[in-house]
Structures are given as structure tokens and as C-alpha cells.
Amino acid sequence: QVQLVESGGGVEQPGGSLKLSCTASGFALDVYNIGWFRQAPGKEREGVSYISRFGAVYYAESVKGRFTISRDNAKNTVYLQMNSLKPEDTGVYYCARTLHMIGDNWSSTSSYYSWGQGTQVTVSS
């Protein structure tokens, strides 16, 4: 089955860390550009980070210096390391893929055509 599968979410206290994984099933991830998005209740889905197939990375201003995106093509997986978590990081986190080099449009949901099912991240004391 061709799909993206997110994992690694959970409940964490403010200041804590979580590492999310986005694993490709049924296809090779290395030719794709991958974005991480999140959606809080009652809010629109927003771009968090992006990594191109050549390794270029982008971050939302709200997560710069705290989150790190990386990819391990041998494991067919893209990671999102989240440190210094804040309550406002709470939401469902999704990864998505595109073959297009989207550059500055990385945070637009319309730039991607295939999404995972999401993993819940809750930051609360």
C-alpha cells in the first residue's frame, strides 16, 4: 500500500522533546520533497518545516531554533526533532510529499498531493 505513516506523537510537558517520524510505505521517499504540517483544534493547517530531496530545509518562524528536520533515505523516513516544546505546539502533525521543487511555497498545503494520517502531539503540564 502506497502511503506515508507518521509516528512518535504523544503527551509531553512544556520544555520537553519529541521526535516524529514520517515513513514511506510502498514507494521510495528519496525522490520526494517532504513537508511537516500541524493543525490545532479550530485552526487551519500550518506549515512547520520542509526538506527537499537535495537537503534544503525551511522552518516556520515559530519553531526555528527548536525543531530540526532531517531525512534518512536508507530508512525511507523523514524526522522532525522537536525540542523546548510549548503548549502552542499542540496539534495533529502531518507529513506530506511532492515531486515539485516548491521552494518558498513550502508552507502551502496546496503544494502537496499526498498526506499521512497524522499523529497527535499534546504539550501540557
Image (tube, helix red, strand yellow):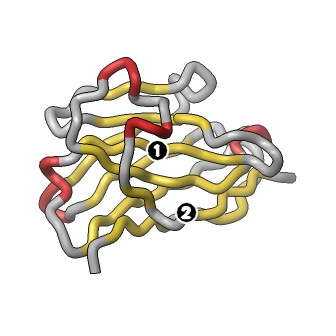
Judge from the rendering whether residue 27 lies leftward or rightward of residue 36; answer left or right.
left
Judge from the rendering whether residue 58 lies leftward or rightward of residue 108; answer left or right.
left
Q: Secondary structure at mark 2?
A: loop
- Residue corresponding to mark 1: 36
Residue 28, relative to residue 84: is it above or below?
below
Q: Quadrant of the N terminus?
A: bottom left
Position of residue 56 measured from the top left corner of the image (x, y, whole percent) = 24, 27
Residue 15, relative to residue 11: is it above or below?
above
Please rate how many residues cluster around mark 2, counting C-alpha atoms within 10 Å: few if below 14, some from 14 to 19, many from 20.
Answer: many
Q: Residue at x 57, y 19 (%)?
A: 61
Q: Which amino acid lies under the numbered mark 1 shown in the image of this protein?
A: Trp
Numbered label tally: 2
Q: What is the spatial separation of the Cα atoms under label 1 and label 2, in whole angstroms? A: 10 Å
In the image shown, does 125 or 104 lie closer to the viewer? 104
Q: Earlier in the sequence, mark 1 or mark 2?
A: 1
Taking the view exactly as shown, the residue that stands out farthest to the bottom is: 1
